[in-house]
Amino acid sequence: EDILLQLAFESENINKHEDAINFLTSILELNSENETALYELGFCFDVSNQLDRGKDYFLDFLDKQPYSHIAWFNLGITYGKLNLYEKAIEAYDFAIAIKEDFSSAYFNKAHCYGQQEKHLIALKCFEETLQFETEDALSYYYIGECHEKLENFEKAISNYKKAVKLDEFLADGWLGIGSCFFELDRNLESLSYIRKAIELDDLNPDYHYLYGDVKSILGFKEEALNAFLKVQELEPDNEDIVIDICNIYQELENPEAAMNQFCTAVQEQANNAKLLYNFVAFLFKNGDLINAQFYLDIALKK
């Protein structure tokens, strides 16, 4: 078993996941209770994008070893990756029934509920996670996220703060605090938290987008424009950012720059009806009724 496990690890290190799968299944034929082999096998099926094969393997394995909480857990992960969330939840429930303090199963189960927008149930599962493990930044972060989705912004802020206290490098936690203050119209308070998130992760377009929104509301249009242009640089396929950039250009009394942005975007995003309607409004506002009529017809067809 030990030799096969080392061979599996070495195969993973050089990205020969098929070889690793063969070594790991050989281990489980020798000892079906080898927990490390089970976890690694689930990982290999995942990273090699063999989810259906993994599902079939663990279903077959559980026919022979129905009390393996790790196999149920791996099956849950596989179902989750296949977007079969109800089946994933059922698998996690079996894992929890076998091992009541299996915190990772509660955690993943909560994610499945979150993916289905069932934030109240997800919140309960994340809170259960904390009963069976030491305080964890990610658990508090996701509890905060659930509260934010449920518009319990003060509770969300409280949990996000617990998360960043445990892990000061958790950029999403800092952004979560800023986002909640933004929702509460406490825009000046939100800025420092959003800046902290950007400082930790300068390549996340969502962070710059929120920063631009806050700066725009506070009247700092040039800074908002720079933030939106950064979003466009990081995420050129974003269908909404062009509209925000053009609106800022108009507020800065620069219709020529707005026109250039719109014309380029309309060519690149020909099926973006929302963009077309905003372009029509821009043309109408600027007195170009012939082109406004032309693009309105196109937008209506879309």
Image (tube, grey):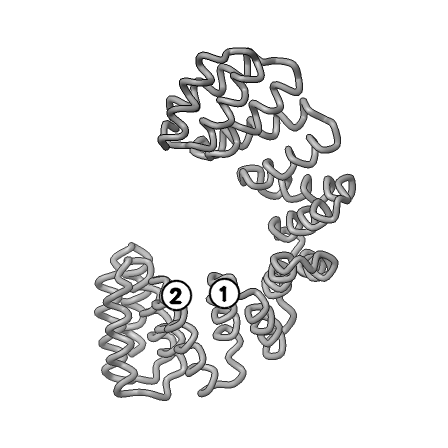
| Numbered mark located on residue 111 in the image | 1
In this rendering, the answer to whether 84 lies above or below 302 is: below
Q: Which residue is tagged 2?
A: 80
Residue drawn 30% across the image and 62% down it: 10
Q: Nearer the viewer, residue 180 or 205?
A: 180
Q: Is residue 73 left or right of residue 2?
A: right
Give the x, y percent position of residue 2: 31, 76
Tell me which amino acid carries mark 2.
Gly
Figure check: 302 above or below 200: above
Q: Is residue 198 above or below residue 94?
A: above
Front-lying residue, 45 or 18 = 45
**Label 1 sits on what residue type?**
His
Identity of the residue drawn at 64% across and 33% down: 212
> Residue, x 57% and y 13% (percent of image)?
286
Please report whichever mark, 1 or 2, sits nearer to the chain's N-terminal start: 2
Q: Residues within 10 Å of mark 1 (few under 14, many from 20)?
A: many
Residue 109 coordinates in the image, percent (x, y): 48, 71
Circles 1 and 2: CB atoms closer than 8 Å: yes
Picture quadrant of residue 207:
top right
